[in-house]
Amino acid sequence: MFYKYRSDSEYTEMIFTTGKVHLSTADALNDPFECSLQEIGKEWIDDKIVEMKSAGVAGFALAAHRAIESKSPFFGLSPNKTKKILEKLSKKKDLDSSYEFYKKTMISINGYPPSNCDNFFSNIDKQLNKVGIFSMSTCSLIQLLWAHYTVDHKGICIGLSATKGSKLDNSEHCLPVSYSDSIPEMSPKGFQSEMAFSIAESGNMFASSYQLSFADDTFRAAISSKPTCWSYEKEWRYIEPIGGEFPWPGRLSEIVFGLKCPEKRRQHYIDLAERNVPNEVLLYEIKVKPGSNEIERVPYKQSKTIPLMPLETEHFNNNGNKVKRLSIEQFSHEVMGLIKKGDIEEALYQLNNNLKDSPDAPHLLNLKGVAFGFSGQHEEALIMFQKLDVLFPNNPENLYQQSCALSALNRNLEAIQLLRRANELEHNDSSIPFNLGLEIIKTGGDIAEAKLFLNTARLMGHPKARQVINELVPS
């Protein structure tokens, strides 16, 4: 079992609601020596560059010979023109001139240069710093981790199991941290590199870049080494070539509540797990061992979750395609991702498909309105949010969304009315008083009243409220 210590925050909630974890890159980790390598010897680098250039030229010549033999085009060139290129290449007297000819030829016939061998080693640090890392521990009873990462024991610890076939069960993606006060050195065998290929418009493949292989021993040592002062963490790492969001790397199997995690928040995480995790999740809490300053883990009063999702999350749809069944929160996250990327057509396709089965589902109607709004279709967005208002009246979030659509349509006075209604209801959205203040200013209303709403937004944590207040002319 691998454990992720987390503070009680919206980002921790998103592990459940998105079905994903966030992999940080080296510069976001807490050790300045992360992903470091000792300096590589110049002689070895020079030899390796010669090897890589030779491979590039040889591969180019081999592909050209095969095109001539098969009487097929070579990057759009006829066999006769290809022969002339090979003749010119054969007259080059050394590797450097051969490589320069190869490079210029690729640019002239393809529009792109081949991979730059000379930059390979200068890019190693960049590649190391792009790697995505998700740090875990093999123990859920480390007091320093509870103190550091859960904000004084108020958070939770999420247990992920290495189920068969999962990323945590794959030694290429899950590796233990080695603790040493020496920076990793290059392996005596050198680096294991790999070549990335691209396809030209002509349909021919060409080598577009060299990079370190993800399986290279030195590369893996650099991304899994820390000074010995961190050894108490008992760390393992789930890694990917780049940082960002990735699906759970293993089964989400346990939740351990911190010593000071409030009862209300415990129930909140249980509810999140029951809505979003298809399997039973075992529940534990941290207690102080009687008569000691040590902690222990004991079963929680509710020993496990009761999943509301089906255990089998993949099924075949009516078209015979294999699809994954998502919770409401997970589906909403995926669709919002499409909307933010500007893929409105795909977002609306997914929403309309689901609305056929659930025409009054509030999350679907809301997302459809948001999709219309993002694409500038504000009349259509307003219709969606008004339909929601009829089905689920007096919802502050929906009133806010309607006001945004009205404002975009220059119906500002109507937007103000809805924002006033929303602000009178119980809510924790700082954008409601913020937008209300802005709309009052836009329409030439009472600046003093606008300031009151903007100040409320500031106290609620709105990131732009203070700046707007400071920019207002004193009344």
Image (cartoon, rainbow, N blue to C red):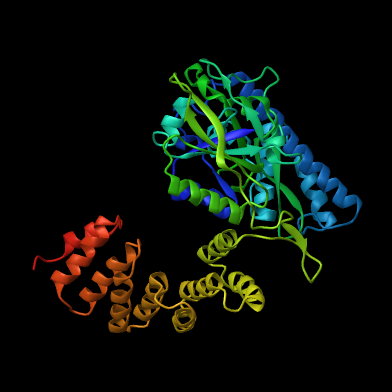
Q: Pinpoint residue 291: horizontal percent, then vertical percent.
A: 44, 19
Q: Where in the figure is residue 157, as x and y percent of width and height?
A: 52, 37
Q: Quadrant of residue 124?
A: top right
Q: Residue at x 69, y 36 (%)?
A: 162
Image quarter hosting the C terminus? bottom left
The answer to whether one can see residue 222 in this image is yes
Depicted 38 relative to depicted 397: above or below: above
Name the one closer to the observer, 91 or 354.
Answer: 354
186 to the left or right of 68: left
Count of numbered badges drawn on the protein = 0
275 or 184, nearer to the observer: 275
Residue 138 lies, with reference to residue 422, above or below; the image says above
> Closest to the observer: 373 or 74?
373
When the figure is inspected, residue 435 is found, relative to residue 271, above or below; the finding is below
Q: Position of residue 98 (x, y in %)?
A: 71, 37
Residue found at x 53% / y 69% = 363
Find residue 364 and report its horizontal and vertical position in percent. 56, 72
Judged left or right of residue 86, residue 152 is: left
Q: Residue at x 42, y 38 (%)?
A: 154
Tell me, yes or no, if residue 91 can be seen here. Answer: no
Q: Is residue 148 above or below residue 356?
A: above
Quadrant position of the N terminus in the picture: top right
Q: Would you say 287 lies left or right of 203 here?
A: left
Is residue 71 shown left or right of residue 159? right
